Amino acid sequence: MDGPGIVRLAGLVLLLVVAAWSDISRGRIPNFLTFAGMGLGFGIAVAEALLQGRFDPLALSFLGWVAGFGIFYIPHHFKLLGRGDVKLMGAVGALQGPPLSALFIFHAIFYISLTAACMALVLLIWQGRLLEGLKNSLRLLVKPRLAAELPQITLPYGVAIAAGTLWAVSLALMR
């Protein structure tokens, strides 16, 4: 792994740990953290592009940002995720690049979804609301606009983003 790859991974891990801690302790992910992550991702990509004389690193970082931000904006639009979660995923996408593949952001989203589903199930079981939660989930699949009307459970999604992304990173590094 080269220097930019080490900086990229170290920045990603630090970003995720601090974001998860902030989401648990304060219930939000601050802008300075997400924008710093995006800046680091784009900064590394620009440096790599200039050093290599190729546009690929910047394009990969930008497309990762678009995918992470864009995909997570959809549930935010239905009031299912907070703005900090969306911006955090943009930062995760911007930090995509070697040694992580171009499809890394999609792998991360898959593992984030699995982690969040497990967290939600544990929380619903803990609260004794499993059946109610499963019924509401089915209603949301049919009519996503019902999100504002249904009872909500609060889940620190930054924790799911951190755990799922680190899961994806560990699998990517084992290949």
Image (cartoon, grey):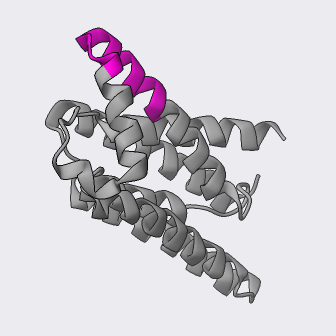
Residue 56: within the magenta?
no
Can residue 175 be seen at all in this image of the molecule? yes
The answer to which quarter of the image holds residue 103 is: bottom right
Q: Residue at x 29, y 23 (%)?
A: 132
Please give left or right for residue 48 compared with residue 164 in the image.
right
- In which quadrant of the rendered image does the C terminus lie? top right
On screen, 27 above or below 80?
above
Instruction: Give percent across and percent down for residue 70.
Output: 45, 69
Foreground pick, 145 / 4: 145
Residue at position x 35%, y 59% in the image: 86
Q: Quadrant of residue 57?
A: bottom right
Residue at horizontal 50%, vertical 31%? 115
Q: Is residue 45 above or below residue 14?
A: below
Instruction: Report the label total.
Output: 0
Residue 33: tell me if it is visible: no
The secondary structure that most of the magenta stretch takes on is: helix
The residue closer to the viewer here, 100 or 11, is 100
Asked if residue 121 is among those painted magenta in the image, a careful observer would answer: yes
Where residue 156 appears, as percent x and y from the top left, is: 29, 35
**Position of residue 48 measured from the top left corner of the image (x, y, whole percent):** 66, 76
Q: Is residue 103 left or right of residue 22?
A: right
Give the residue displayed 43% in from the left and 48% down from the top. Answer: 141
Tell me which segment is drawn in magenta: 116-131
